[in-house]
Image: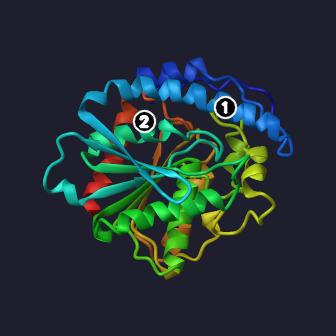
Amino acid sequence: MPARTIPAPTTVSPQAQAVLAQGSPFGRIEEPDPQDVAAWERRVEEGNRSLTEMIATRFAAQQSALAIEEHRLSAATLYAVAPKELSSENEGRAVLYVHGGGFTVGGGIAAAYAAAGLAAQAKLRTFSVDYRMPPRSPFPAGLDDAVEAYRFLLDRYDPGNIAVYGPSAGGGLAASCLLKARDHGLPMPAACVLHSPEADLTESGDSFETNNGVDAILGRLTNSIALYANGHDLRDPYLSPLFGDFTKGFPPTLLTSGTRDLFLSNTVLMHRALRRAGVSAELHVWEAMGHGGFLGAAPEDQELFADQVQFILRHL
């Protein structure tokens, strides 16, 4: 294709247009070689620090209305983020939140902060698992932590009152978690929300070509995927849930993405895989939205979040 300029469309809000016009606030992030553990440790440390600072700013506005508790799993921390005034009806409901971050960042207290918006808007206790990540703990450590976190909720809540939410890498991990939980005989939750999930680690979908460079936030995750997968077959459903067998059971699912999202094909293909298996699934695609939405600065972000919350509440 010849070089061309892609303007911010007039079909989105002025706030969304402004975000698109400014491009990525992070710049292009170069990933180290998967074999360079020291470089990855520096990259993870820097990424976690900057991400935590960014999310903490958003959390500060909600802090007075929320409480955070910590629970210890076998090898990970499970944060419980809940409204300080929880209704009696919602006391028996919960969400498992699986944070994003390219399988390498987003851990620590950032995992709790990331779940705060959902807890506040849904008015539900939201458990965010600080799962292990590479370079120290590649696959399947994080998946094992997510499944253990789901078991933790099942020990305390009826499965019909549990929802699972995962964005980006967390979306892929959330779906893989449910596949593994199902394969181990555990009951499925009432609902699942996957936002722009990294559901296919082979990154073979069309949007990995058409939206590469158009998505201002995200580029291909080739090196971080290699680091996370640790030599395992990328088509393993516990790594790439797109290749799973959904005919054996999967909860009603809402999938959300945007026309500029690098993971648009992941989201679309996952939706079709669920529908072919007879699973109730909705696909919502947002105009001009990239992987990071509009960074929380546009009304479209709020509409998207409201749709996700309503889907969860409707199914619990």
Instruction: Name the residue beneath numbered marker 2.
Output: 113
Label 2 is placed on what type of residue?
Tyr
Q: Residue at x 66, y 27 (%)?
A: 46
Label 1 is placed on what type of residue?
Glu
Q: Residue at x 72, y 32 (%)?
A: 43
Q: Is residue 118 above or below residue 237?
A: above
Which one is earlier in the sequence, the residue at label 1 or at label 2?
1
Measuring from the top left, give residue 261's x and y in whole percent.
Answer: 59, 41
Q: Secondary structure at mark 2?
A: helix
**Total residue callouts:** 2
Measuring from the top left, give residue 98's x and y in whole percent.
Answer: 49, 51
Measuring from the top left, give residue 270's x and y in whole percent.
Answer: 56, 62
Q: Give whichever of 175, 59 is nearer the camera.
A: 59
Q: Which label number is shown at residue 45?
A: 1
Q: Is residue 218 above or below residue 20?
A: below
- Mark 1 or mark 2, whichever is nearer to me: 1
Q: Secondary structure at mark 1?
A: helix
Q: Is residue 81 above or below residue 29?
A: below
Measuring from the top left, give residue 221's x and y in whole percent.
Answer: 72, 44
> In the figure, is residue 207 to the left or right of 71?
right
